Amino acid sequence: MAIRIVDLGRMDYAAALTEQQRVHQRVLDEDALPTILLVEHDPVITIGRHPGAAAHLMADESLLAQHGVTVSKTDRGGDITYHGPGQLVAYPIVRLNDLKMNVRRYVWALEQAMIDTVAQFGLRGHRDDAAIGVWVGGQTDNQPDSPESRAGSGGAKLAAIGVRVRRWVTMHGLALNVEPNLEYFKLIVPCGLADRPVTSLQNELGEQCPTFEQVKAALITQLQKHLTA
């Protein structure tokens, strides 16, 4: 199945959401190929549909303004997260029926695409028994080969996932920390998980960290591989 790749560059969250919605409708109408939108957002905190997610915003309006961070409520799943420069965001807009996937299998595929991406640069990522996303460090078992297995616990969060599915077409997606300013994550309880640190490729690999464009190219390849029927 062909997947169209669209690189939006750096874009405000609201503008990118409008573009997501436009493309989503076109894919629903079968007027466009399944599409992956890639973007690097201006600093923004997004609050998902998880109950109590708004309570995990730790900064008041004054502190947010000081850091130049906006806040946006969104219809994706998940809790609260931060997006900003240095973080690679991908929004796959694909038909799950075409991929023969349910939502659990789709989320597993997104995780695996990121695990395989960072492995190319010498970093071992893993799933967590208790939380969606990709983690490094902590305790890991062998990589699972099915969505029913998580295999791992603890460590620092490298990538977040929050999706929405409408009429079996996906929206929202994943955020992989390449080289963001990790201080901004202190404005929230990331994904509602207290006492779980957030990390990045830059933080883990130091001088061996790949460029943003290298990570983007690797992620595109892995998403195309894992989101194929």
Image (cartoon, helix red, strand yellow):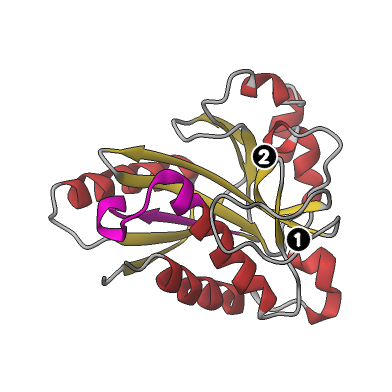
Q: Which mark is residue 68?
A: 2
Q: Which residues are drawn in magenta? A: 88-107
Tell whether position 95 is magenta.
yes
Q: Earlier in the sequence, mark 2 or mark 1?
A: 2
Picture residue at 43% right of the left edge, 74% below the top: 225
Residue 48: image location, x then y, percent? 54, 30
Residue 190: image location, x then y, percent? 72, 38
Q: Quadrant of residue 177?
A: bottom right
Q: Which residue is mark 1?
A: 200
Picture residue at 27% right of the left edge, 47% below the top: 24
Mark 1 residue element: loop
Left or right relative to 184: residue 105: left
Q: Nearer the viewer, mark 2 or mark 1?
A: 1
Q: Which mark is residue 221?
A: none
Left or right relative to 52: residue 98: left
Q: Amino acid at mark 2?
A: Gly
Residue 28: image location, x then y, percent? 19, 46
Left or right relative to 189: residue 93: left
Above-or-below relation of 142 to 127: below
Image quarter (top left, top right, bottom left or bottom right) of the N terminus? bottom left
